[in-house]
Image: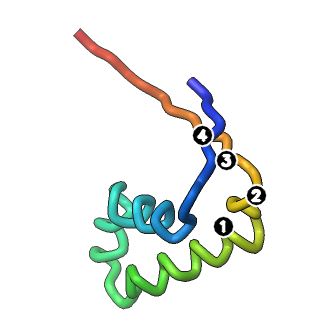
Amino acid sequence: MRVNKQVADPKLFARGLVYGTPVIDQIRARGGANPERLIEALSDAFIHELDLRERPLQMQAIVFEAA
């Protein structure tokens, strides 16, 4: 399923990607990286590189179901 989503707050979106996925476990396991600095860098990139405040982001969900 694909959906276009307007990102109202790129910093909040970046925070969700870092803390809301298994990425945070990898950051902590490797040590040395500051998650808050990563959020700042991602947020800046989302604004300047992808211009997320002006255009929607195409997102995709892949769902598996087993019985």
Kind of residue indicated by mark 3: Leu
3D distance between C-alphas at marks 2 and 4: 16 Å
Q: Nearer the viewer, residue 54 or 34?
A: 54
Q: CA distance from mark 1 to mark 3?
A: 10 Å
Q: Earlier in the sequence, mark 4 or mark 1?
A: 1
In which quadrant of the rendered view does residue 44 lie?
bottom right
Q: Is residue 56 above or below residue 61?
A: below
- Secondary structure beneath dot 3 equals strand
Q: Give the image location of residue 40, x and y in percent.
A: 52, 81
Label annotation for residue 66: none
Residue depicted at 57% across the width and 73% down the height: 42
Picture quarter with the C terminus: top left
Mark 2, residue position:
54
Work out whether mark 1 precedes mark 3 in sequence or the reverse, and give the earlier one. 1
Question: In the rendered image, which residue does mark 1 sit on?
Answer: 46
Circles 3 and 2 in contact, beta carbons < 8 Å: no
Give the crowd class for mark 1: few <14, some 14-19, many >=20 residues within 10 Å.
Answer: many
Q: Outermost residue, left direction?
A: 67
**In this rendering, the label closer to the viewer, 1 or 2:** 2
Q: Is residue 56 above or below residue 11?
A: above
Q: Which residue is mark 3?
A: 57
Q: Of the residues shown, which amino acid type is indicated by label 4? A: Met
Which quadrant of the figure contains the N terminus? top right
Residue 57 percent location from the top left of the image: 67, 47
- The residue labelled by disc 4 is 59
